[in-house]
Image (tube, coloured by chain):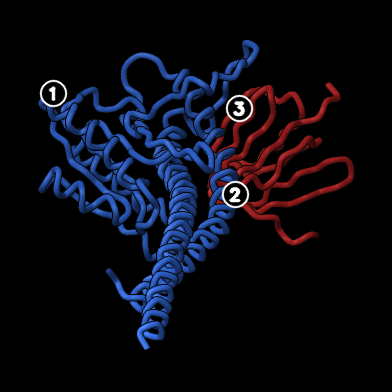
Chain colours: A blue, B red
Amino acid sequence: MASLKDMRNRIGSVKATQKITKAMQMVAAAKLRRSQDAAQNARPYAERMASVISNLAAGITGEGGPVLLKGTGRDQKHLVVVSAADRGLAGGFSSSIVRAAKEHIETLQAQGKQVAILTVGKKAVAPLQRMFPGQIVQSFDLSGSRTVNLETAQPIAEEIARRFEAGEADVVTLFYSRFKSVISQQPSRRPLIPAAVEGEAAPIDLGGAAYEYEPSEEEILETLLPRNLTTQVLSALLENQAGFYASQMTAMDNATRNAGDMIAALTLSYNRQRQAQITKELIEIISGAEAL
Amino acid sequence: MAGKLHFSLVAPEREVFSGEVDQVDAAGVEGDFGVLPGHAPFMTALREGPVTVRDGNRTRVFEVKGGFADVTPQGLTILAEQASEAAAS
């Protein structure tokens, strides 16, 4: 049995841990609010972009059309972009994204497809390296940048586009965590190439009028699609960030509560032991006195 | 048609402007253009330049860098890479 002094030390250390987790929880809560706003503010742009593209895509019929939109028509080489967090202590945030990606990659490999992996965020690297050694072609580390903005997403999108144009990939899929609410983040899959023309963005009713394009339709699409790629990556990164802080907040809240429970249990047994010792000493004194 | 034009200017980080206005002038790659309520569907890439929003006798100017303008019967949307309100003139 641990001595009273050991128990006191133990209680002290759990209390110190509790203070840290409590502080982390509050920091995460503050950052969550900011990143949630950022994710929300970015939504109109992404939505408009999607509706503009689906509008344009509806206008392009038959053969041809930019490959970024339609894909190469092949389905052999897959590039899977896995975007997770850069830091830990956020419960199962990163591992749930990795798990979703792993299932997808295994299905593809079972079908005999070639899969390359591109990771964003430190926490995706190690588990994927273990599961699919040698298949990670590139890793982006975002821990250096404090905020997620267009400049963060740009190099990632450019790299994806470059690999696609170099023929290293026919299909590009992005894994990230969709921010549903503070208590619920869902690992999700988003097709990047070919661009998903989302069903929710219904084509706008033009009332019979024809669209006019300046410059031509193709030229607009050609500049718009790479930008759409960046937007898609950016919105995934923003959702990820909000989800990360939400997940961290929940995890740290739990940790704080667990530490509280532990302190209560330890204090109880500490007090019991202390009382038992006092009783024992009293008995010794009394029986000593009686012996006289 | 004496209605108003629904105009929204969105940048990747946020929606810069959204509301009902009388007229919007912008700089397209093939020339400047103005959009009034009821404009025909039209889409163009934008040059770097000012976007002027007129509503009644109020005028607001935004500096826009790269992007697209999309005119639909529902209104005008400008998707800009970068957009900020120019100093009040």
Disc 2: CA contacts within 10 A as few (<14), some (14-19) or many (>=20): some
Q: Position of residue A286 (x, y in %)?
A: 42, 80
Q: Which residue is drawn at 60% across and 47% down?
A: B14
Q: What is the three-letter code of the residue carrying label 3?
A: Phe
Q: Which residue is drawn at 67% across and 51% down?
A: B50
Residue hosting label 1: A111
Q: Residue at x 37, y 29 (%)?
A: A195
Residue lying at the far top of the rendered structure: A208
Cα distance, mark 1 to mark 2?
A: 41 Å
Q: Which of marks 2 and 3 is in front?
A: 2
Disc 1: CA contacts within 10 A as few (<14), some (14-19) or many (>=20): few
**Vertical placement of residue A227 versus A8, above or below:** above
Q: Residue at x 14, y 48 (%)?
A: A130
State which chain disc 3 sits on.
Answer: B
Residue hosting label 2: A37
In terms of sequence position, does the residue under pointer 1 or pointer 2 come before the other? 2
Q: In which quarter of the image is the N terminus of chain B?
A: top right
Cα distance, mark 2 to mark 3?
A: 32 Å
- Name the one closer to the observer, B26 or A110: A110
Residue hosting label 3: B42
Query: Is residue A223 something one can see in this rendering?
Result: no
Cα distance, mark 1 to mark 3?
A: 44 Å
Q: In which quarter of the image is residue A272?
A: bottom left
- Name the one closer to the observer, A205 or B22: A205
